Image: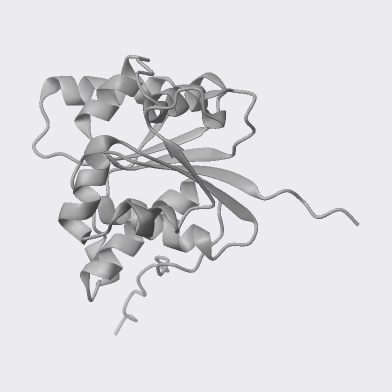
Amino acid sequence: MNTPAPRRIIVAISGASGAVYGTRLLQVLQGMADVESHLVVSDAGWRNLQHELDMDRAFVEAMADHVHDAANVGAAIASGSFRCSGMVIAPCSMRTLAAVAHGLGDNLLTRAADVMLKERRRLVLLVRESPLHLTHLRNMVSVTEMGGIICPPVPAFYLRPQSVGDIVDYSVARALDLLDIPHTLAPRWEGLTLPEAA
């Protein structure tokens, strides 16, 4: 009996604030036997991982099944022939958003995202910036028109989070939902029960 091949998911971490979203996604995927994670981190992403989380490169790389250098545009994930279920950029900086919106493919991270779009595969961008100016918004529209999904990590306070970890997990859970990956990371909204009439 043949064992089905694991689903390949690319996790990209760019230089926006919110490196915790990418690392938490890696941690969750690490516990899934049927998922194979591929990590690519921009230079600014590595700086943020150290600054925001005190995580060094070796620690972060150990969370992924495969690691690709952002400068290596000849890596496997740069080709459409590399079978992959989807990609999440968490967090996604405005610089990375702009490169994806304009098809630059100027490093492995943006090239892999370009491949997702051209192959009509799932691309999820956890964009992180506020406030937004017109170019940011236009770039989001462009990526959306090409089939990408803009998914800002916005807290869901109706779920009554008790910690920063709960807030992070909610956004990671939304990304997993968009990739059709089952999880129990965050509670699901069950609706409100209306009070009985007197």
Q: Nearer the viewer, residue 173 or 71?
A: 71
Q: Is residue 91 above or below residue 123?
A: below
Q: Nearer the viewer, residue 71 or 12?
A: 71
Q: Is residue 6 left or right of residue 85?
A: right
Q: In which quarter of the image is the N terminus?
A: bottom right
Q: As drawn, which residue projects farthest toward the front?
A: 58
- Residue 191 is drawn in which quadrant? bottom left
- Which residue does the image show at 40% across and 67% down from the upper left? 186
Q: In this view, does 160 lie to the left or right of 149?
A: left
- Which residue does the image show at 28% across and 56% down from the upper left? 56
- Which residue does the image show at 24% across and 58% down from the upper left? 155
- Which residue does the image show at 42% across and 66% down from the upper left? 188
Colour mapping: one colour
Q: Locate residue 182, reporting x and y percent.
A: 56, 59
Q: Locate residue 50, reporting x and y percent.
A: 21, 54
Q: In which quarter of the image is the C terminus?
A: bottom left
Is any part of residue 73 visible from this angle?
yes
Q: Is residue 28 left or right of residue 164?
A: right
Q: Is residue 143 above or below residue 131?
A: above
Q: Locate residue 25, reporting x and y percent.
A: 41, 56
Q: Which of 23 and 196 is in front in this view?
A: 23
Q: Locate residue 193, reporting x and y percent.
A: 36, 75
